[in-house]
Amino acid sequence: MHADHLYQLARRDLLHNCGLGLGGIALGTLMERDGLLAAPVNPLAPKPPHFKPKAKSVIQLFMAGGPSQLELFDYKPKLKELSGQPIPQSYLEGKRFAFLKKNPKCLGTVRKFKRYGESGAEISELLPHLGTVADDIAIVRTMKTDVFNHGPAKLLTQTGSPRFGRPTIGSWVTYGLGSECEDLPGFVVLQSGPRGPRGGAYLWSNGFLSSVYQGVPLRSQGDPILNLNSPPGIGRERQHRAIDAVVKLNRERLAVTGDPEINTRIASYEMAERMQTSAPELIDLTGESAATLKAYGAKPGGSSFANNCLLARRLVERGTRFVTLFHTEWDHHGGGENLEKALDKTCAQIDQPCAALLNDLKQRGLLDETLVVWGGEFGRTPMGEVRSTIGRDHHIETYAVWLAGGGIKAGQTIGETDELGFYPTEQADRIHVHDLQATVLHLLGLDHLKLTHRFQGRDFRLTDVGGNIVKRLLA
């Protein structure tokens, strides 16, 4: 405010506009003395669901890049028989692809498949450990998405929209349910692989929701969270006094303005202080048994998908509501990233830890209340790409995911694709991204039609204007 304008203000206006000045501080002190200054509500406090839930928490295993369903979960003998021949033009009419040129040719897989468990789930030789828990998972082979480029497709999977600015599913869940953990974030993000997922922090953004619902990236080695520790020379007692003073000032400002974002600020300061103890303890895997570490293939102090799976179990065990693990690289076009050695390597990185996670949750009595979702942003085409090595382009018509725990009817495979693996044989088997999102919310006791937030004059929701609960997935 310009100094010349101060003389034109009435005393009331000055006090009103200087909420953190002497007037605001005096008011806050008097209100606190008289018991009129209510403590702010923790925005992450547990909230009741819309109805009785089957699951309390979610572990999302996001395979960034688009795993090839044709090499992993959807064996097609006819495609193998026609390998090297042009795919019929009827499949290509009106279709667009990210990289495929004219007259692409069929590409059959060289991978062997085997039926596992009492369910007889057909799973690739690349995932033998997952095969041992086949009766604990439900495989969906007819997922459908709308966009074929990585960034927008990831955004659609995580936010319900291919455009930036919407809250991610983890943010919606903590917005709707809060968290049962007071010492760790309600929504945590873990990353592994050669690089981060395309889309970056937008994939765990709070969008237009309060920033308290944003996903918190956690590192599995070194400092768990950057800038969490106090600067050199700042002891715990001195830090606590500083935070206490800042919180008190924020509460006084909250009493004056009623701005809900101040609640977020208060909660963040208090959470950060608690996490200085809880976060290092969380990532310290030395307390886990040798048998558990061996089962996951995890190493204390290491950074890997295996370590992150074990951290995910430790997080939900402590009450964290939503954990997303991003693992790259699944973008096997050919060239350096291909369906030969590169796919073998990526599958080997995730196979054992995924199976170990399910077994560990089950042994600890956590699987029934923890929903595990595995999948990427889309699948791969039945046609191969012309590159130096074998690969496939992005495919949005059918791809595969699997789910376990948390109210899922396990030991089943949903959906059948045509003989080339291009389309579902039945339209009723097609499960859109919004359908999967609606089902995840349903298992958590949330009605996707009622979980809304008004922004810019419109009620937004995760599933946008779509979404149907996949009842065949429910136990």
Image: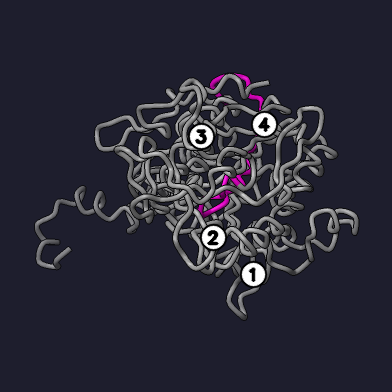
| Residue plotted at (59% across, 39% down) | 401
Q: Position of residue 26 (x, y in %)?
A: 38, 52
CA distance for labels 3 and 1: 38 Å
Q: Residues within 10 Å of mark 1 (few under 14, many from 20)?
A: some
Viewer-closest of 279 and 354:
354
Tell me, yes or no, whether the two marked residues, 2 and 3, touch with CB atoms within 8 Å: no
Q: Earlier in the sequence, mark 3 or mark 1?
A: 3
Question: Which amino acid is tagged 1?
Answer: Asp
Secondary element at tag 4: strand
Mark 2 to mark 1: distance in Å? 40 Å
Q: CA distance from mark 2 to mark 3?
A: 24 Å
Q: Residue 144: x, y in percent?
A: 46, 35
Check disc 3 and report its element: helix, strand or loop: strand
Q: Is residue 272 left or right of residue 319?
A: left
**Disc 2, SS:** loop
Determine whether the residue tagged by mark 1 lies in a helix, strand or loop.
Answer: loop
Q: Is residue 253 visible?
A: no
Residue drawn where x is 67% and y is 55% of the image: 347
The tag on residue 223 is 1
**What residue is pinned by disc 2?**
390
Mark 3 belongs to which amino acid? Met
Disc 3 target residue: 143
Residue shown at 61%/49% (left/top)?
109
Q: Could you say which quadrant of the image residue 450 lies in?
A: top left
Marking on residue 138: 4
Q: Residues within 10 Å of mark 2 (few under 14, many from 20)?
A: some
- The extreme bottom residue here reads 233
Instruction: Tell me if residue 33 is in the magenta stretch.
Output: no
